[in-house]
Amino acid sequence: MISSFWNLGTLESLSGIYSNYIHLFSCFQGLVLGIYSKEKEDDVPQFTSAGENFNKLVSGKLREILNISGPPLKAGKTRTFYGLHEDFSSVVVVGLGKRTAGVDEQENWHGGKENIRAAAAVSALELCFARKSWTPPQASAFCPQRCPSLTLVFWFLCPCEAGCRQVQDLEIPSVEVDPCGDAQAAAEGAVLGLYEYDDLKQKKKVAVSVKLHGSGDQEAWQRGVLFASGQNLARHLMETPANEMTPTRFAEIIEKNLKSASSKTDVHIRPKPWIEEQEMGSFLSVAKGSEEPPVFLEIHYKGSPNASEPPLVFVGKGITFDSGGISIKAAANMDLMRADMGGAATICSAIVSAAKLNLPINIVGLAPLCENMPSGKANKPGDVVRAKNGKTIQVDNTDAEGRLILADALCYAHTFNPKVIINAATLTGAMDIALGSGATGVFTNSSWLWNKLFEASIETGDRVWRMPLFEHYTRQVVDCQLADVNNIGKYRYVKSAGACTAAAFLKEFVTHPKWAHLDIAGVMTNKDEVPYLRKGMAGRPTRTLIEFLLRFSQDSA
């Protein structure tokens, strides 16, 4: 018996859709369209402009079947339909939340943009990697769950939970995405959401082409693709196993990407003899425990019309695997330490993206690259090493190695007479405990620089939070028995304010008035916190660094 909910007109409309389906079954192109939540209880949910246009194109059928297929869609929730139009085998409608969503001062991001990123990502995944449940239905098809409310169904309209889902993968190689009012955010969400590391698997995912639906803001769309691709480059570098992503290999990949991005670039892959000439004893003390040779990667992007204009200098921690050294880590989750070069990955990827954007500024990127391994040559607790600026360091914990290699890189950064120095590092587990994956911790001696980073992060949704750089913490690292500074501070057996004492240590190697240290340990991985990133290495905060550079270049123009 047919429920009274299904009137004759509805069945006739569905029959028309069905008649198209057999023709469409071999047409694998998807379409993502957005719909807003109701502003008031008695409102009707409104499609985006693209959604409204498509609904008119199919004579109102999209609205009709959406209304009968379930309750209004909440933000990030999707519903998939088939056979609506001959150009698209599948159409996903996704909830965008309220149209009026803007900057949320409590959340410190633009809620509307975040909703669009999440919507584009989940929709693209729904189309490309969701479970398919289609055997073309016959006129007398029944739901396998034998729903009592209807006889003739299409699985996407079936009110039971299981519908007619089967276990065949739906692989759609091309997806068009509704700009949803912000083409850049939509592109970011789609490109970030589809990324998955499968380089070392025999069976690869189908490569998916994502493009803007309609003739909207192509410039903003391409900018979003570029921002997301930059973050995906960082994710790729971080996710690759350490036996593949050695210091030398890392440098080669960045060289290839930077050279292909712009002709206004130089790359210097500095070997161990050069590092020794620079008297980077702190960096070398970490590298000597491994058989893999260290590399000091120096990259230049010369976008300013004035070649002598001082650059911005980015510095990234490049430990391609961190065992902890003699102060060895616990075995559990040690595999994640293949991403301990996340600082180098994010700053280098941001510079590659800046080169693609052709920004009119000069940028230098510095990445000390090595492994931290235990051996007969490795640093021992209690050893004293000498940094490039002559300061001696008592190494009481060899697992606090990131600050040792950054010390020399920060000293070297000053030789470029930079406008700004920003370093990024997966530096401390204490940062993860303090902020988790909610935001990158920023320690800076410049309120101006903090504000610029904060404003950029609101735009990207990849947030930052200011942390203290008090003299209180400096006293703990300079009160040292054997050397000028201690690499973990005098309260080394008390696990308190570890991220703050690490930042205070780095400050001892900085004289520049505009310096920021980004501790990205908490945002290194994604489980399910960011809906437009899959589980794995996150590549954060690459887009915030790109946005910072873009805004800096605009302010300088």
Image (cartoon, rainbow, N blue to C red):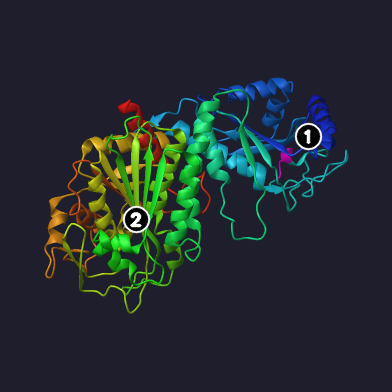
Q: Place residue 357 in its image quadrant.
A: top left
- State which quarter of the image contains the N terminus: top right
Which disc number belongs to residue 277? none
Q: Which residues are magenta?
A: 156-160
Which disc number belongs to residue 3? 1
Residue 243 position (above or below residue 4): below
Numbered marks: total: 2
Q: What amino acid does circle 2 point to?
A: Lys
> Closer to the camera, 60 or 511?
511
Q: Is residue 95 visible?
A: yes
Q: Main secondary structure of the magenta part?
A: loop
Residue 345 position (above or below residue 173): below
Mark 1 / mark 2, whichever is N-terminal = 1
> Closer to the camera, 133 or 521?
521
Describe residue 112's horizontal placement relative to residue 50 as left or right.
left
The residue depicted at 33 percent of the width and 44 percent of the height is 364
Residue where numbered disc 2 is placed: 317
Q: Position of residue 445 (x, y in %)?
A: 20, 43
Q: Is residue 157 magenta?
A: yes
> Closer to the camera, 184 or 535?
184
Whole-number angstrom distance, CA of label 1 to CA of label 2: 64 Å
Residue 377 position (above or below residue 508): below
Q: Place residue 138 in its image quadrant.
A: top right
The residue depicted at 44 percent of the width and 42 percent of the height is 352
Mark 1 crowdedness (10 Å alpha carbons): few <14, some 14-19, many ≥20: few
Q: What amino acid does circle 1 point to?
A: Ser
Describe residue 167's horizontal placement relative to residue 210 as left or right.
right
Q: Position of residue 297 (x, y in %)?
A: 37, 54
Q: Is residue 277 magenta?
A: no
